[in-house]
Image (cartoon, rainbow, N blue to C red):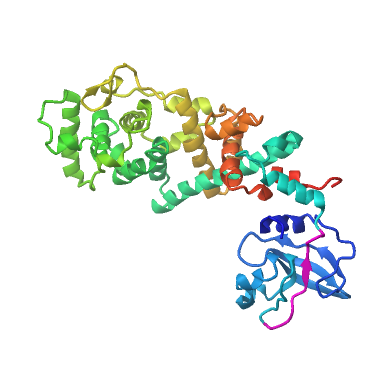
Amino acid sequence: MANFHEDFLHLVWKYQYFDKRQCVSEDHAELQILKIGYQNHHEGPDFKEAHIRIGNVDYFGHVEIHLKSSDWKAHDHQHDPAYNSVILHVVWEHDVEIQRKDGTTIPTLALSGKVYLDVVRNYERLLSSPSHILCSGQLESVPDILKFSMLEKSLIERMEEKSLKVLELLAENKQDWEETTYQWLFWCFGFKTNQQAMLKLAKSLPYKLIKRHSDRHVAQEALLFGQSGLLSGYSEGLFTPGTADGYVDSLVREYQFYRQKYGLSPQLYPSEWKFMGVRPANYPTIRLAQLAALLSNSPHIFSQVIHETSGLSDFSAIFQLTVSPYWHSHYHFGKLSEKYSKRSVTSGTLSLLAMNFMIPLWYAYGKFMDNLDWQEKCFGMLQEIPAESNSVTGKFEKVGWKPVQAFDSQGMIGLYNHYCKGRKCLDCKVGQSLLRPSGK
């Protein structure tokens, strides 16, 4: 039997890439395919609402596809009523007669020897590529409009996935958009390595409590650093008071007061934060200092991002912040750094936050409000932001597909993660186009 997966036969049936002349079922009845049906990506038969003429009788129902007829029994379809309406079993190899639950025989079409030879060869050529991107050697032959269409599809899937996380938080927060935006901001400020810890911190420190102290920056810092657990060595008396500088002592005193006043839930453990393998500018201490400055300057972050931001310049203005002077010369508590820096949010970080914080928030808000204009707004913003440079975009650049805008790079990340990495070429428009037989 040929070395391919069942999804190859799905594509062959969907695009009818086989010789239909003198097409007969395995019991030698003349077979005409009048309607292939629509592909079902959920449970149940593979193609629904097909129309097949067998002999002089028209059948309306579903089509199921397997590599071998015996896979019907291997998948236990004979006991599933959802498959009682299957009117045609399409297989590569017919090795056993198949009946429905009521004992009637299902007509079978075997495709072995009928699939166009160049389709089989194109499939084998594609799957045998040694590249991370299997189609890399043939990309030049794919029309730009088709590649753009697949990038757009992958981008939308990526935004759907990210916005789902926002909407899950919204449900947890009982439709409170302010609290959700606050938690989503923390998640995004974790930049993968510290996302979980950041979200846990935000959930342990309600936004309304932080806003209550918007006029006292030191109180917000004390709450954030104290609740993060990063001050635990000082607050638990492991260090003699006064041995650290005055800034740390003031944070400890403030936090101990507010922890008792508000009955705060247990703080995080210092071990939950990751410093190893992280650039100093992305240390959780620096990100928390930046968040404290941001929340102090912008006590209504949801309104600012949703109602007052129309482009990248508006978004950038929100992040024009100044952290406490202590962090200009420190990356850790009680330890001077070698270099002095104002620890401002860099343009690269701003672009990442626009892509990963603002745009998913916009997209989720549009879904919640049932307003498609927000999707177009997301696309417009992604065309303002330069393409990011990372390991995934590097793979595409290496094979001659260079991203220009964030629209491209975000689409490429979605394309690689959801299609290329899993070798799902047959679900990709680019891969499908490369399997097309000559003359089609």
Q: Main secondary structure of the magenta part?
A: loop
Q: Is residue 220 left or right of residue 84?
A: left
| Residue drawn where x is 44% and y is 37% of the image | 303
Can you say which quadrant of the picture contains the N terminus?
A: bottom right
Please provide percent x and percent y for residue 403.
62, 30
> Foreground: 37 or 274?
274
Spot the residue most to the front.
1
Is residue 259 visible in the rendered structure shown here?
yes
Q: Quadrant of residue 406?
A: top right
Is residue 315 visible in the rendered structure shown here?
no
> Foreground: 347 or 208?
347
Asked if residue 108 is among those painted magenta in the image, a careful observer would answer yes
The number of numbered discs placed on residues in the rendered structure image is: 0
Please provide percent x and percent y for residue 146.
73, 39
Q: Is residue 114 left or right of residue 254?
A: right
Q: Is residue 19 left or right of residue 327?
A: right
Q: Quadrant of residue 283?
A: top left
| Residue drawn where x is 76% and y is 36% of the image | 141
Please provide percent x and percent y for residue 111.
78, 62
> Foreground: 32 or 408?
32
Spot the residue most to the bottom.
102
Asked if residue 147 is among those painted magenta in the image, a careful observer would answer no
Please provide percent x and percent y for residue 425.
66, 47
Which residue range is magenta in the image? 102-114
